[in-house]
Amino acid sequence: MGYRKVALKTGCLHHVFSRSIAGFEIFRFREEYLRMMETLKFYQVDRSGIRFSRKSAADIQNSSHPKPEFPHVRLIAYCIMSTHVHFMLEQVMDDGISKFMRLVLNSYARYFNTKSGRKGPLWESRFENRLIETDEYALHLSRYIHLNPTSAGLVTRPEDWEFSSYLEYLGENSGSPLCEFKNVVSLSPELYRKFTEDRSDYQRALQMLKAHLID
């Protein structure tokens, strides 16, 4: 598996990033983004070797005797872009982030390759990670993650990008939440929106973050 420059520490927050191979566009349609979001929800806990499918997810959700859930990670923030994904993760069990990322990336690769009639790897050989050491850094990083679509010119406002956790932070997500962020980002939805939209402060914060950012 190889040595990591930054160790994945249990009980700590990490910025985790994975790119598609050769910048290949791997999220092209809404259904593909939604598939990744469903996969993230499914694999946050240890499923004891069960592969994700919409049927398996429904079976687990509808079971009258659900098995105890042992979380690999807690998802704090995320953004899915056409060629890469950003996550802020808390590692809950030892090796939890590595297990979570392996399951999520492999599951989506199987889905995408089957759907597209292609073969071969979909992701670069390994995901990248940075340790998040302060609450201030975590707060600014969450904004950086949520502003990825606006920085890329895909939308004008971050709330217009459906495939990130920003609407959860604003309390406007109509679906099932993926993230547990309130112990990390304690701002009210109104204050968090103001914080995110303060572009001058964001530019200053980038100077603080740039030595730690993955991309």
Image (cartoon, rainbow, N blue to C red):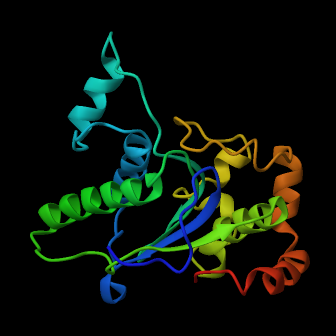
The answer to whether any part of residue 135 appears in the image is: yes
- The image quadrant that residue 15 belongs to is bottom right
Picture mark count: 0
Q: Position of residue 7 (x, y in %)?
A: 55, 69
Q: Is residue 5 left or right of residue 209?
A: left
Residue pictured at 65% horizontal, 80% vertical: 213
- The image quadrant that residue 6 belongs to is bottom right
Q: Position of residue 50 (x, y in %)?
A: 22, 39
- Please state which of residues 9 and 179 is positioned toward the viewer in this rendering: 9
Q: Most extreme residue toward the top, as rendered?
A: 64
Asked if 58 appears above or below 135 in the picture, the reply is above
Residue pictured at 59% horizontal, 44% vertical: 179
The N terminus sits in image quarter: bottom left
- The image quadrant that residue 27 belongs to is bottom left
The C terminus sits in image quarter: bottom right
Q: Is residue 179 left or right of residue 35?
A: right
- Please state which of residues 105 and 158 is positioned toward the viewer in this rendering: 105
Residue pictured at 82% horizontal, 87% vertical: 207
Asked if 168 appears above or below 70 in the picture, the reply is below
Q: Position of residue 205 (x, y in %)?
A: 84, 78
Asked if 150 appears above or below 79 in the picture, the reply is below
The answer to whether any part of residue 31 appears in the image is: no
Residue pictured at 53% horizontal, 43% vertical: 178
- Please state which of residues 166 and 68 is positioned toward the viewer in this rendering: 68
- Please state which of residues 113 and 52 is positioned toward the viewer in this rendering: 52
Q: Position of residue 63 (x, y in %)?
A: 30, 16
